């Protein structure tokens, strides 16, 4: 399908902002910088202990809830809120919750370690992190997925903001994160080759989304239209944990073999509350 090659409009960040901070150990103040919109992203190298990577990866591949449709490029355990009504998302999240927990409850799980660290850092400013809720029901705690798609991108260029505008999710608290920053979190527990994170210096506006017909999905943006903007390509390796502002268009480039990550999105809904969802 040929999509419009209309020039993308939106916000571009200053060069000082548009970079990833890199560290060899977890530093939650940097994650809070991303949540507060003070920096684009941060990557912590090799911070998931080898035994935890292996255990979590094995739990993922062995999970009876692992979805894979023939011909589709992904395997996943968890539920997506993307492009569906909120009741469906919460039903799916409830149905899979136990299986997600079984994967992320691996000993020394990066999901627990990271969230505890973020929570402690947030506490200093009187805030806390929890899974998003609606009418007493919970969003999915994590999405564990592996991509094996061929081509330029194993995950097509998209942003994580548009999906929070879906009117079918009206009243779901994640929509209040639109007044703050969207922070995507990924933890890589298995990696073979390739699969860099690609991020472009453009935060598309609604006019652009409307003209592309992706106002509530944020996917896909065409590579040709993105060529106008500066891009970063970041090697991702097993054991890495990274967090970045998901309102900027991003993708995963071609990868070979398995690239398994634990992921969720998070953001402030008010100065005291950070919620996460998938
Ligand atoms: Fe994303």
Image (cartoon, rainbow, N blue to C red):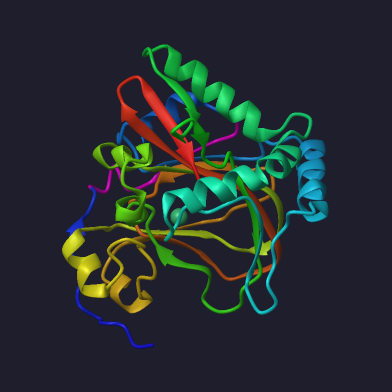
Residue 10 found in image quarter: bottom left
Quarter holding ligand 1: bottom left
Q: Residue at x 75, y 35 (%)?
A: 49
Q: Is residue 244 magenta?
A: no
Q: Residue at x 66, y 40 (%)?
A: 46
Q: Is residue 15 above or below residue 141?
A: below
33, 264: nearer the viewer: 264
Horizontal arrangement in the rendering, residue 89 relative to residue 169 (left or right): right
For residue 55, say whether it is visible.
yes
Q: Residue at x 44, y 24 (%)?
A: 29
Q: Is residue 103 above or below residue 237?
A: above
Q: Position of residue 263 (x, y in %)?
A: 57, 46
Q: Residue at x 46, y 62 (%)?
A: 251
Region in magenta: 14-25
Q: Position of residue 91 (x, y in %)?
A: 56, 48
205, 269: nearer the viewer: 269
Residue 149 found in image quarter: bottom right
79, 268: nearer the viewer: 79
For residue 8, say whether it is visible.
no
Q: Position of residue 48 (x, y in %)?
A: 69, 36
Number of numbered markers: 0
Q: Main secondary structure of the magenta part?
A: loop
Horizontal arrangement in the rendering, residue 9 relative to residue 22 (left or right): left
């Amino acid at each position: 399908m040929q999509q419009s090659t209309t020039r993308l409009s939106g916000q571009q960040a200053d060069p000082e902002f548009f970079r990833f901070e890199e560290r060899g150990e977890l530093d939650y103040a940097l994650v809070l910088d991303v949540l507060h919109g003070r920096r684009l992203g941060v990557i912590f190298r090799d911070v998931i202990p080898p035994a935890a990577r292996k255990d979590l990866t094995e739990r993922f591949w062995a999970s009876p809830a692992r979805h894979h449709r023939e011909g589709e490029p992904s395997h996943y355990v968890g539920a997506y809120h993307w492009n569906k009504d909120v009741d469906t998302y919460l039903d799916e999240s409830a149905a899979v919750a136990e299986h997600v927990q079984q994967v992320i409850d691996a000993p020394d799980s990066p999901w627990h370690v990271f969230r505890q660290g973020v929570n402690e850092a947030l506490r200093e400013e009187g805030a806390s992190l929890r899974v998003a809720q609606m009418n007493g029901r919970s969003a999915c705690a994590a999405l564990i997925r592996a991509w094996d798609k061929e081509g330029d991108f194993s995950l097509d260029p998209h942003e994580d903001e548009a999906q929070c505008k879906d009117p079918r999710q009206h009243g779901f608290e994640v929509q209040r994160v639109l007044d703050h920053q969207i922070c995507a979190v990924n933890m890589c527990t298995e990696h073979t080759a390739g699969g860099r994170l690609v991020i472009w210096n453009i935060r598309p506006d609604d006019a652009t989304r409307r003209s592309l017909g992706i106002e509530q999905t944020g996917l896909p943006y065409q590579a040709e239209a993105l060529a106008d903007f500066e891009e970063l390509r970041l090697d991702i390796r097993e054991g890495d944990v990274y967090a970045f502002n998901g309102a900027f268009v991003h993708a995963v480039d071609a990868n070979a073999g398995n690239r398994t990550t634990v992921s969720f999105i998070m953001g402030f809904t008010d100065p005291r509350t950070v919620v996460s969802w998938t």
